[in-house]
Amino acid sequence: MQYQKNNPLTFQDLNLSTQLLNALDDLGFTTPTPIQEQAFSPVMSGKDVVGIAQTGTGKTYAYMLPILRMLNYSVQQNPRVLILVPTRELVVQVVDEIEKLTSYINIRITGVYGGTNINTQKQAVSQGLDIIVATPGRLYDLAVSRVLQLKSIQKLVIDEVDVMLDLGFRHQLINIFDILPKQRQNIMFSATMTDEVDQMISETFVKPHKISVAKSGTPLENIKQYGYRVPNFYTKVNLLEHLLSDKETYHKTLIFVGFKKIADRLFEQLEQKYSDEICIIHSNKTQNYRLRSIEQFRKGENRILIATDVMARGLDIENVSQVINLDTPEYPENYMHRIGRTGRAEKEGVSFVLTTDKELEHLQDIENLMEMKIEQLDLPTEIEISDQLTPEEQPKIKEINNPHKRPNDDEVGAAFHEKKAKNQKTNQGGSYQREIKKKYKKPKTKGDKTFNLKNKKRKKR
């Protein structure tokens, strides 16, 4: 089934129930995306499925529509569908999307994740479930406590599996696979196909049906990409302040930063000017703070959101006007995930990438992956070029005279001096003991004592 823009299929053409069609109609969706169209029949068939598609292409509905189509009403206690995602924010988002699709269906859904009271989640699980959405760590904790029984799982969905492996969840995933029923359908969705992902597929899946809508480096056609050459962090801050001053154009801007420390530093700088318009999320922030920041940005209460790669991965926030890459990512795939936050649902988007001289190689790798050049813009003349450097940007000072790295180990240091005569004596033992040994010729060892006794006997004879 091929996706054709000139004569696209509609959801009415798929084998969907009236309840699902009504929910999609309420949401204003009439035409499936390519990944939704191509994944529907394979997932419905019950075969293992691996889907590779860019972020922002509707992967959640791609697996949920066929699953919900096959999921009959039941009053059983244990869940039948397990969906694993890498972050707490994605748990909340996926649960919200499923609830929208099931507005006309009687389905019990619960999301569980770490960082909150596990007893509250145990109570929710004990009331009975059909679908559970979870992060691997908290799911395993609930399963080990025997509150959550996974013996009835029929379908396992692993979403954003490449991020999950990057976060070090491999061993937890393997432990979860071991306690799941052997007879189940495995469904995996990822934005990139890495060696680790490929290995997990070969170890876990049985002759999977593979769907690849576009290679990971294919840029979205509806995103206009621009770049700036900027010398350092504080000049980047000056450029951001200049761009963000246009509130009408930059009405919902997502700024990506590679590291939590840099994200906090940027937030401190921009908060001075945009205190009531800016928020931040990264893994060191509390769960409530992160969810509140996302919700405020989603509703438009804050127009600027600073985020690290992992925290914003997979988040579906509508109408993001621009994505600004404060740094140029070392891994080109991360750049693709970042810019995919704008231009979603076939709407137009804009992205910027700020590049220092040290990051030029990363920019070339991104362009090589996309097989296209990013248009470089001149810095506005009113932008002040800062000579202030962050600790990370400051040149490393080499130690010229390091006493621990002398070329000659026998060479003495500058502080060396000879001991005084009185301090050069060696410890000979107590003087009294030495004199007694001389007088009575006490043997020093047991062997000497035996030798002396033999000599005495010979003299007596």
Image: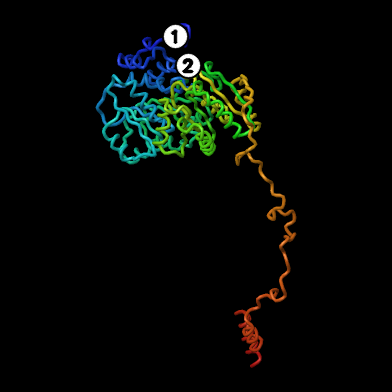
Q: In this view, does 99 lie above or below 419?
A: above
Q: Left or right: 368 with respect to 175? A: right
Find the residue positioned furthest to the left. 75
**Residue for badge 1:** 8
- Place of residue 341 in the rendered image (x, y in percent of width and height, measured from the top left): 48, 24
- Place of residue 447 in the rendered image (x, y in percent of width and height, measured from the top left): 62, 79
Name which residue lies at 71% across and 71% down.
419
**Residue for badge 2:** 347
Find the residue positioned furthest to the top. 7
Name which residue lies at 37% across and 24% down.
97
Q: Which amino acid, mark 1?
A: Pro
Q: Which amino acid, mark 2?
A: Lys
- Place of residue 78 in the rendered image (x, y in percent of width and height, measured from the top left): 29, 31
Q: How crowded is mark 1: few (under 14 residues within 10 Å), some or many (20 or more)?
A: some
The image quadrant of residue 379 is: top right
Q: Nearer the viewer, residue 387 or 339?
A: 387
Find the residue positioned furthest to the bottom. 460
**Of callouts 2 and 1, the N-terminal one:** 1
Q: Left or right: 288 with respect to 421? A: left
Give the Cα distance between marks 2 and 1: 17 Å
**Circle 2 — which element?**
loop
The image quadrant of residue 26 is: top left
- Place of residue 337 in the rendered image (x, y in percent of width and height, measured from the top left): 51, 26
**Circle 1 — which element?**
loop
